[in-house]
Amino acid sequence: MNKMKSFKLNNGIRGIIVPMPGLKSVTIEVFLKIGSKYENKGEFGLSHFLEHMAFKGTEKRPTATDINREIDSKGASYNAGTGHEMTSYYITTVKENAPWAIELISDILFNSFYDEKETIKERGVIMEEIRMYQDNPMMGLSGEFTKFLYQDNSNIGCWNIAGEVSDIKNVDRKIIIDYRNKFINPKEMVVVVCGDVDNELEKVIKDNFGGFSKDESALPEVKLILNKEKNMVIKKELEQGHFCMGVPALGWSDKRKYSLKLLDIVLDGNSSSRLYTKIREERALAYYVSPVGEMFKEGGYWAIQSGVNLDKIDEAMEVVTEEIGIIADSIKEDELKRAKDYLLGKMKLSMDKTGFVSGYVGQKLLLENSEETLEEELKKYNETSLKEVKDLAKEIFKKEEIRTLVCHNR
């Protein structure tokens, strides 16, 4: 990547342009510090609901169909996503359409109607989405695991991002608008443009985002309180048993996060990892073995999820327990090097994708107030020593710290 150009608008919104010469695609992505971690009880699921309402109509583009037709006419793609700590909205298009995409995203962010009829319709869509995750443990169990870990934070923080059906069933237009106005804050907003573009787009960003102003709103302070219980069972009529197992770990503000990511790759991060090899390849216990950990500012956890035959679930979980117990003493230099080579290879390939780069740059700037480049990030992984990895493994990978969530029909 060429040198990034960052700037700040008078209203506090931060912008950053990332030149990526030679590419056809351009991604415009806007990041806001609106996420489920900041929701008070009574607001659970509203960050996700707000994101769903973004493309439903503005004064200039009155309906969702108007917006969809306009985007389709450009051959562009778009989406949005809600996390625990932020929400983002993006359009990927070609270079000549970049000014149009910047204007469209600013329009839906600042001028959406949140029409009452659309709100009620989308309420039904979201409740079905929640039920879909509840009916499919492969998709929804990691959210349940996060909720299980932090459920003692009962008054603040929705740890299952979409909320529950009971949280959503009475949401109306006023609730959505009040929530939006509470949290949208220009000083907690970042606009990223990545692709074969130049600094002329700075003026386009300022023209479209500079007119928004609002009194500052402080985000609530969040403390992560771990559930005292370490084991939980959810009973469902299933052909398989699904489980999540994990240990309390690090937040993204911890400098040891590079060691943790490499440990994750060694344990369950790819198809040659220890747990994938032992659970799937050697014992044929499961089709999928997936990492599902989370990092927040205040802390986080490492975890693995898998689905196995009901009669074999105890065996699979014992494999995980054993590897957690021996990883600190058994990891070797060649294994660490393979993890580094895998991570560096994957990230370098992703650096050709404007959407990947915009996601990295925007999250880094919004959450960490950092303009660290991907190349600088890769260097930190490369410089991580075996001793650092072992020391961290000894600290966090302890059998007595394991938490388990099992879903089956026993």
Image (spheres, rainbow, N blue to C red):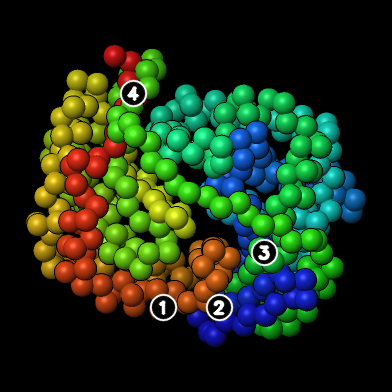
**In the image, is 89 to the left or to the right of 388?**
right
What's the residue type where badge 1 is placed?
A: Glu
Residue 20 is marked as 2
Residue 140 seen in render:
yes
Q: Residue at x 67, y 73 (%)?
A: 15
Residue 189 is marked as 3
Question: What residue is pinned by disc 4?
Answer: 233
Mark 1 vs mark 4: give the one in front.
Answer: 4
**In the image, is 360 to the left or to the right of 254?**
right
Q: Residue at x 19, y 47 (%)?
A: 398
User: Callout 1: 10 Å neighbours few (<14), some, many (20+)?
Assistant: few
Residue 81 seen in render:
no
Q: Residue at x 35, y 56 (%)?
A: 250
For the residues labelled 1 and 3, the Cα–Cα distance comes to: 24 Å
| Residue 326, horizontal then vertical, whole percent | 11, 50
| Residue 154, horizontal then vertical, whole percent | 52, 35
For the residues labelled 1 and 2, the Cα–Cα distance comes to: 14 Å
Q: In this orientation, which residue lies closer to the viewer: 172 or 204?
A: 172
What's the residue type where badge 2 is placed?
A: Met
Could you tell me if the residues under marks 2 and 4 are in contact, i.e. CB atoms within 8 Å? Answer: no
Instruction: Name the N-terminal-most of marks 3 and 4.
Output: 3
Q: Check the image and report above or below for 368 versus 137.
A: below
Residue 375 is marked as 1
Quadrant location of the C terminus in the rendered image: top left
